Amino acid sequence: MDHLSRDKRSENMSRIGGKDTKPEIRVRKTLHASGFRYRLHVRKLPGCPDIVLPKYKLAILVHGCFWHRHENCQRATNPKSNTTFWTNKFAATVERDIRNRKQLAELGWKVVILWECEVSDGTIVVQRVRSAIEDT
């Protein structure tokens, strides 16, 4: 059972933003320190990717494990109340993610997905980005 009232829980959830999250800022700092220059939230691209490296035609999506359903991650928990709502919401998010990645690929963009649980290790971030660039 939730220890917060329905109204308080709704207020808390409404404050969760989609931009400038802690994991995203961590990725940006790591990339900048490694010499990469990027653009943020390019609206002209499908899904408005979190970070875009135009020079390499690379879009980086920083996904929260809970919201984007990172498989086998302990952060991707399922709420115990209102399960139908959450199941539908998560399914729609995953479908949208797949659609956006497909559209980016059709436009010739490479896509790197970085999960919230991975970004604390800066070496993983840089390795994944460099690997995607070298595959070009």
Image (cartoon, helix red, strand yellow):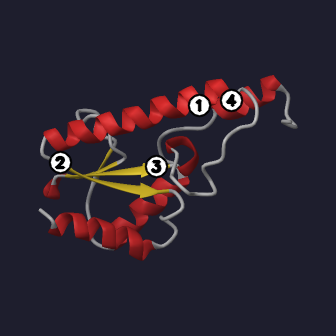
Q: Are marks 1 and 2 in contact (CB under 8 Å)?
A: no
| Residue that label 1 marks | 87
Residue 40: x and y in percent read 33, 46
Q: Amino acid at mark 3?
A: His
Looking at marks 1 and 2 on the same chain, the residue that comes earlier in the sequence is marked by: 1
> Closer to the camera: disc 2 or disc 4?
4
Residue 81: x and y in percent read 76, 30
| Residue that label 4 marks | 83
Looking at marks 1 and 3 on the same chain, the residue that comes earlier in the sequence is marked by: 3
Looking at marks 2 and 3 on the same chain, the residue that comes earlier in the sequence is marked by: 3
The answer, for residue 32, to whether it is visible in the render is no
Looking at marks 4 and 3 on the same chain, the residue that comes earlier in the sequence is marked by: 3
Question: Residue at the spot x=63%, y=57% of the render?
Answer: 74
> Closer to the camera: disc 4 or disc 3?
4
Question: Residue at the spot x=71%, y=38% of the render?
Answer: 79
The span from disc 2 to disc 4 (Cα, nearest Å) is 36 Å
> Closer to the camera: disc 1 or disc 2?
1
The span from disc 4 to disc 3 (Cα, nearest Å) is 22 Å
Q: Amino acid at mark 1?
A: Thr
Residue 27: x and y in percent read 42, 61
In depth, the one of 5 and 78 nearer the eye is: 78
Q: Are marks 1 and 4 in contact (CB under 8 Å)?
A: yes
Q: Residues within 10 Å of mark 1 (few under 14, many from 20)?
A: few
| Residue that label 3 marks | 63
Q: Residues within 10 Å of mark 2 (few under 14, many from 20)?
A: many
